[in-house]
Amino acid sequence: MSISHIITRQDYIDRKHTGDKIVMLTAYDAAFAGIMELSGEIDVILVGDSLGMVVQGHDTTRKVSLDHMLYHTEIVCRAAPSIPIIADMPFHTFDDPAEALKNAEALIKTGADGVKIEGNKAEVVRRITGGGIPLMGHLGLLPQTAVQFKVQGKDEAAAEKLMNDAVELEKNGAVAIVLECVPRSLAASVSAALRIPTIGIGAGPDCDGQVLVLHDMLGLNHGHLPKFVKQYSQLGELTRNAISEYSREVKNGTFPSDSHSYH
């Protein structure tokens, strides 16, 4: 299956049953989305409301508005036309089923192939999927409403609720479910119980795919990183070094040189 064909619910189901892991990353701008497009390695791009933290500099995702998401989603869609793109629905944009459908439709009009919501809101899920819009669920740690950022589903009651929520999301038409910060064993059980794929972030290797925040993965963020983040590069350090070298050359007059000048 071509990676550009993971768009419909059946496409996601088929991908799960091939056993090929789904590779998902966040993107918020044309530069990185374009690199993903050229790589041919990314199955799905998530335009996450995590942009509130990694792009806007807030300490929460709750300050991200629908207008912010429309803006960033359109940019990413333009730069990565062959990759399926899921757009996060920000805080309070899916409280009411009718309003949720209207907001989801607005995101689809920017070029997104589907939307993602946090939690199990049955009426909202049915309204959006009933409107023909692919919807990805999100269970476990829910950044929009979390009081503490910690592992979810560790006790029996919480694990049972998460399993029931996952089953209900599938029943109501979700194409896939992100599982964030849940024990590996629980994520494995949920994955085995569903026909649709699970995409883990801090949920162990037994999910049907994985997602990371791009800036975390590239080493662009500083400060505390969650246990589940693996840094595949240190672009933050490389960028600081480049800035230092540029500053030094401007100050000592070696940049711009004659070769960087017009004649």
Image: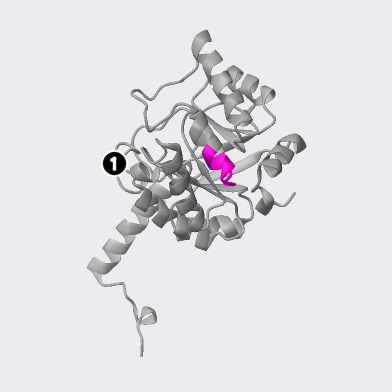
Asked if the magenta segment contains residue 193, the reply would be no
Comparing 118 with 221, the one in front is 118
Q: Nearer the viewer, residue 218 or 41?
A: 41
From what the image shows, is residue 249 above or below residue 173?
below
For the question of whether residue 154 can be seen, the reply is no
According to the picture, the residue beneath numbered tag 1 turns out to be 58
The picture quadrant where one finds residue 62 is top left
- Disc 1 residue crowd, few under 14, some 14–19, many 20+, Cα 10 Å: some
Query: How far from the left and from the top, in percent, is residue 110?
Result: 48, 58
Observer-nearest of 150 and 158:
158
Is the residue 16 above or below the residue 77 in the image? above
Farthest residue to the left: give it: 251
Type of amino acid at the residue the image marks with label 1: His
Question: What stretch of residues is rendered in magenta?
Answer: 127-135
Q: Choose between 230 and 15: the one closer to the eye.
A: 15
Q: Is residue 115 visible?
A: yes
Residue 173: percent from the left, percent from the top?
61, 35
The residue lying at 34 percent from left, 77 percent from top is 257
Residue 136 sits in which quadrant?
A: top right
Q: Secondary structure at mark 1?
A: loop
The quadrant of the image that shows the C terminus is bottom left
| Residue 130 painted magenta | yes
Write the residue at 55% across / 23% down: 165
